[in-house]
Image: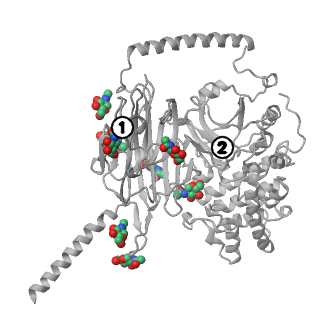
Amino acid sequence: MASSSSELGFVFLLLFLSLLVASKPQQDSNFLFEGFNNSENHLNLEGATVVKPSGSLKLTNRSYNIVGHAFYYKPFQMLVNTTNTTKILKVSSFSTSFVFSIVPSSSGPEGFGLAFVIAPSTQFPWSSPGHLLGLVNSSNDGSPSNHLFVVEFDTVNGYRSQADSKGNHVGVNINGMNSTVNEPAAFFIEGTEAQKEEFSMEESDAVQAWIDYDGEKKIVNVTIAPISLPTKPSKPLISHPIDLHEVLKESMFVGFSASTGESKASSHYILGWSFSLNGPSAELNSSRLPEPPTKENDPSSTSFPWIKLAVAVLSALILLLIFSLCSLTLYRRYNNFENLEDWELDCPHRFRYRDLHVATKGFKESELIGIGGFGVVYKGVLASTGTEVAVKRIVRGSIQGMREFAAEIESLGRLRHKNLVNLQGWCKRKNDLLLVYDYISNGSLDSLLVNPSVVLSWDQRFNIIKGIANGLLYLHEEWEQVVIHRDIKTGNILIDEDLNARVGDFGLARLYDHGQVSHTTNVVGTIGYIAPELTRTGKASTSSDVYAYGVLLLEVVSERRPIDESGQFVLLDWVVENQSLGQIHDVVDPKLNLNYDEEEVELVLKLGLLCAQHRADLRPTMRQVIRYLNFDDPIPVTGAESSRMSSGFLEVVSASTISASYNLSSINSMSSRLVEAGRQPCTC
Ligand SMILES: *[C@@H]1O[C@H](CO)[C@@H](O)[C@H](O)[C@H]1NC(C)=O
Ligand SMILES: *[C@@H]1O[C@H](CO)[C@@H](O)[C@H](O)[C@H]1NC(C)=O
Ligand SMILES: *[C@@H]1O[C@H](CO)[C@@H](O)[C@H](O)[C@H]1NC(C)=O
Ligand SMILES: *[C@@H]1O[C@H](CO)[C@@H](O)[C@H](O)[C@H]1NC(C)=O
Ligand SMILES: *[C@@H]1O[C@H](CO)[C@@H](O)[C@H](O)[C@H]1NC(C)=O
Ligand SMILES: *[C@@H]1O[C@H](CO)[C@@H](O)[C@H](O)[C@H]1NC(C)=O
Ligand SMILES: *[C@@H]1O[C@H](CO)[C@@H](O)[C@H](O)[C@H]1NC(C)=O
Ligand SMILES: *[C@@H]1O[C@H](CO)[C@@H](O)[C@H](O)[C@H]1NC(C)=O
C-alpha cells in the first residue's frame, strides 16, 4: 500500500516536471535586442555573421559572394489548433521591428540586400548568394516545400532578368525571391492620402522596419522609415492580404539573411530587433542602440581592381570637366545658378536654395525632425548667422500660381508674435517649395502630451492654452489683415524651451488651395477639429478656428485624441456626456494625479464646449476667450446647446470622411480667404 502510493507520488512528480518542461518554451513569445552584446546564447549565427564590438550584428562584410544568417535560437509556434478535437490550424499573428544599416562599397557597386525570414530551419545548406539572398538556389526557388516567408530589402534590381541595375525596394516573398508585392523604399507622410516620401536605404544612416501580420485578417503590413524619423509612420508602405496557412509550419524560426554577389557587395548590419507573437513587438529606443556604422571608407572594404579604379577616376575627371564647362556657359548666360524669374529677385524673405541645402546638410535624412500634413521638416543651421531653423519641404506639390503664392508668403513673413512660429522666409525650386521657420526645441504639443516620459503640469498646460489664444487673437484681430489659420490642432502647436506655445503652420491650407493639389483632406482641416459648417459650406472663418481651438482645449485637459482610430470614441461627446452626468472632473488626464486647480480646469473644459458649439454664431471670439481665461468675465452656461452639439459633431465626422473625395473644383471654389481683408499686392 505504502509503496504504491509513493509510486503514485513519483508519477505525479514526473507529470508535473514534464508539464513544466513542456510549457516553458511557450513562456517567451517575445524578445528584444537593443544591440547584440552578449546575445550569442540567444542567436544562431551562420556564415559571415559576427557581433561587432560596438554591439551591432554584422551579417556580411564587403567580400564578394558571401552569405550571413542570424536566427533566434528557439522556434515559435506559428500554427495553433483552433480546437482540441478537430485539426483546424490557425496562423499566429506576429509583429517585429528592427533597425538595419547598409554600408555600400566605396569602390564598387553595392549589393545585394538583406531579408527578414521565417523559416522551418536555421540552415540553408544549398542556398546561393547574390540575388537569392542566401535562402534558396536557382532550382528550388519558389518551391512550396521551402516554407519561407521573406521580407526583402534589396539594393539590386533584376531578379531573373538581364537588368542588374541599382534597386531600392521592399518586397514580400513566399518560398523564394519572386515578390508577391513590392514597393520602392518610401514612407507615407502623416495624414495625407498619397504623399509618399521616397528615400534611399543605403544612404540613410540606418533604417527602421516594422512587419506586422494579422493572423485573423491575413494581412501583412510593412513599414520603413529612416531612423531619424521620430515616430513610426501611421500608414504602412505595404499592406497586403496574404494567407500564410500553407506557407508556415507549426514550428518556425525567425531571423535575417543577407548576401553579397559576384561583383557587388555591401556590409549589412542589424542594430536592434524586437519580435512578438500575438501582440505588438516592443518599441526600439534608438538612443539605446549601437551607433550606426560610418558610411565612408569602411576599412574592411575589398580592394577594387586598380585598372577599374583608374578608369573610374579618369571618366569622373572627364565628366567633371564637361560639367564645369556646361555650368560655366549656363552661368554666363543667366549669370545666376538658380535661374530666377524677375519678380523673385527682390523678395526680402526669399532664401537661396544653396544656403538651405547647406544648412540642412543637403536635406540629409539625419536632419529630418518630423513629417507633417504638408511635407517633411528638416532641422538646419544657417551658415551666415548660425541660427537654427526648421525647413519645411512641401513635396511634389505641383504648385501653380507661384507668383501669387510668393506674395502671400511675403505677407505672412511679416507676421511677428511671441506665440507664433515665425515664418522667416521661403524658397522655391522646381516643384518643391521650402518654407523656413524658427526652430522650436520641444516639438509639437501632441507629441509632448503622449510622451510617457514627460508630464506637463496643469500650470504648464494652462500657460500653453493661454499662449495659443494670444497667438490666435493676433492672427484674427491684431494684425493688419485677418488671418485664418484653418488647421488648428495639437500637432500644429509647437512648444519652445520655456514651455510657451507657438502656433505653427498658419496659412498652409490656403497655400494648398492655390496649388490645386487634390487628394488631401488637409485642405479643409483635420478630422475631429473641423467645424460643422465647414463641411457644408467649405467656408473657413475665424469661428471655425475657434471651434478647433475648443476641441484642442478638451484634448489638452484630457490627453485624449479628438477621435480615436476606430472612430468609436469622440472626445467632444464624451466630455458632454460626463458634464451632463455632473462628473466633469472624470475627463481630466489621470497623469495629472489630481494636481490641478479645479476652478481653472472647469473653466477650460466649459470654454472648450462653448467654443466647440454647433452654431458658429454662438461661439466666442478669441478676444472674448482671453477674457474668460483671465477670469475677467464669467463663462455663460451652455447646457441647452450640448445635446444638439453632440449630434452635430457626429454629422461632421461622417461628412468629413466624404470630404476626402472632394474634387478639385470644389476645393478651389472654397471662398475662404487666408488673408481676407484689405489684401494688397505684395510690393516684391
Ligand atoms: C568577410 O567575411 C568572410 C566570411 O566570414 C571572411 O572570410 C573574410 O575574411 C571577411 N573579409 C574581411 C575583409 O574582413
Ligand atoms: C557593447 O559592448 C562594447 C564593449 O564591449 C561597448 O563599447 C558598447 O557600447 C556595447 N554596446 C551596447 C549597445 O551596449
Ligand atoms: C493539433 O491537434 C493534433 C491532433 O488533434 C495534434 O496532433 C497536433 O500536434 C496539434 N497541434 C498543435 C499545434 O497543437
Ligand atoms: C482543450 O484542452 C484543454 C486541456 O486539455 C482544456 O483546458 C480546454 O478547455 C480544451 N479546449 C477546448 C476548446 O475543448
Ligand atoms: C538546391 O537545393 C536543394 C535542397 O533544398 C538541393 O536538393 C538541390 O540539389 C540544390 N540545387 C542546386 C543546383 O544546388
Ligand atoms: C512571380 O509571381 C507572379 C505572381 O505572384 C507570377 O505571375 C509569376 O509567374 C512569378 N514569376 C516567377 C518567375 O516565378
Ligand atoms: C495594417 O495596416 C492597415 C492600414 O493602415 C491597418 O488598418 C491595420 O490595422 C494594420 N494591421 C496591422 C496588423 O498592423
Ligand atoms: C530611451 O533610452 C534613453 C536612455 O536609456 C532614456 O533616457 C529614454 O527615456 C528612453 N526613451 C523612451 C521613449 O523610452
Q: Residue 545 appears at what percent x and percent y?
A: 78, 54
Mark 1 residue crowding within 10 angstroms, few (<14) / some (14–19) / many (20+) = many
The N terminus: image quadrant: bottom left
- Labels 2 and 1 touching (C-beta < 8 A): no
Residue 67 circle label: none
Front in this rendered view, residue 399 or 585: 399
Amino acid type of the residue that numbered disc 2 sits on in the rendered structure: Gln
Q: Specify whether 31 is left or right of 320.
A: left
Q: Specify whether 555 is left or right of 513.
A: left
Residue 576 vertical position relative to residue 345 in the rendered view, above or below: below
Q: Which scheme is used to colour this image of the protein?
A: one colour
Front in this rendered view, residue 201 or 537: 201
Q: Which residue is drawn at 51% across and 56% down?
A: 452
Secondary element at image label 1: loop
Amino acid type of the residue that numbered disc 1 sits on in the rendered structure: Ser
Q: Residue at x 38, y 14 (%)?
A: 306
The residue that mark 2 highlights is 195
The C terminus: image quadrant: top right
Whether residue 630 is visible here, answered yes or no, is: no
Q: Residue 187 appears at what percent x and percent y?
A: 58, 44
Q: Residue 156 appears at what percent x and percent y?
A: 48, 33
Give the quarter of the image for residue 596. Answer: bottom right
Give the quarter of the image for residue 79. Answer: bottom left
The residue that mark 1 highlights is 128
The residue lying furthest to the right in this view is 678
Q: How far apart are labels 2 and 1 at the CA level?
A: 38 Å
Secondary element at image label 2: loop
The residue lying furthest to the bottom in this view is 1
CB at disc 1 and ligand 5 closer than 8 Å: yes
Q: Residue 445 appears at what percent x and percent y?
A: 62, 52
Residue 582 vertical position relative to residue 37 in the rendered view, above or below: below
Q: Which residue is drawn at 64% across and 59% down?
A: 556
